[in-house]
Image (tube, rainbow, N blue to C red):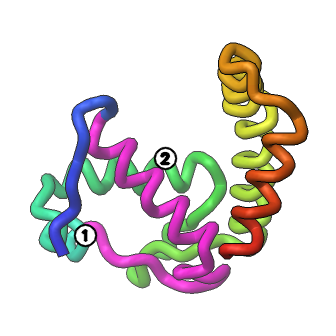
Amino acid sequence: MQQQWNDDQPIYRQLRDRMVGLIMEGAYAEGDSIPSVRAVSAEYQINHLTVSKAYQELVDEGLVEKRRGLGMFVIEGARENILKAEKEKFLNVEFPQLLQRIMQLGISKDELIERITQAEENI
């Protein structure tokens, strides 16, 4: 599977975000091992140092741990910590920007509620 990388942020950061997303979605459960640096490097055709840097960020954030001779494993509570951090990011950074755009466009609360209700029905 070939990953498409974009130019707006470094590849290691995009890879880190992808791994966080997979943990958040449950693709890697707490206690599961994540693919080795070598495997990810080969799969995405990127430098192993790039993968190592992304994985080090996951370690620094307390989401995965390195077990000598065994690999990297998702730490217990990682998913909950990710959800909490992402929720805070949305409410404190993304939502105010979204709300500002909504107000600029003159979208009413009723219109928003109607669209949210329609979207929920289609999920």
| Mark 2 neighbour class, 10 Å CA radius: few under 14, some 14 to 19, many 20 or more | some
Q: CA distance from mark 2 to mark 1?
A: 15 Å
Looking at the image, how many numbered discs can be counted on the residues?
2
- Residue ID at (74%, 63%): 118
What's the amino acid at mark 1? Val
Q: Quadrant of the N terminus?
A: bottom left
| Mark 1 neighbour class, 10 Å CA radius: few under 14, some 14 to 19, many 20 or more | some
Q: Position of residue 38 (x, y in %)?
A: 20, 71
Q: Is residue 79 magenta?
A: no
Q: Position of residue 43 (x, y in %)?
A: 17, 73
- Residue ID at (29%, 35%): 10
Which mark sits nearer the N-terminus, 2 or 1? 1
Seen in the picture, residue 12 relative to 64 is either above or below; the reply is above
Q: Quadrant of the C terminus?
A: bottom right
Seen in the picture, residue 70 relative to 87 is either above or below; the reply is below
Residue occupied by mark 2: 57
- 7 and 28: which one is in front? 7
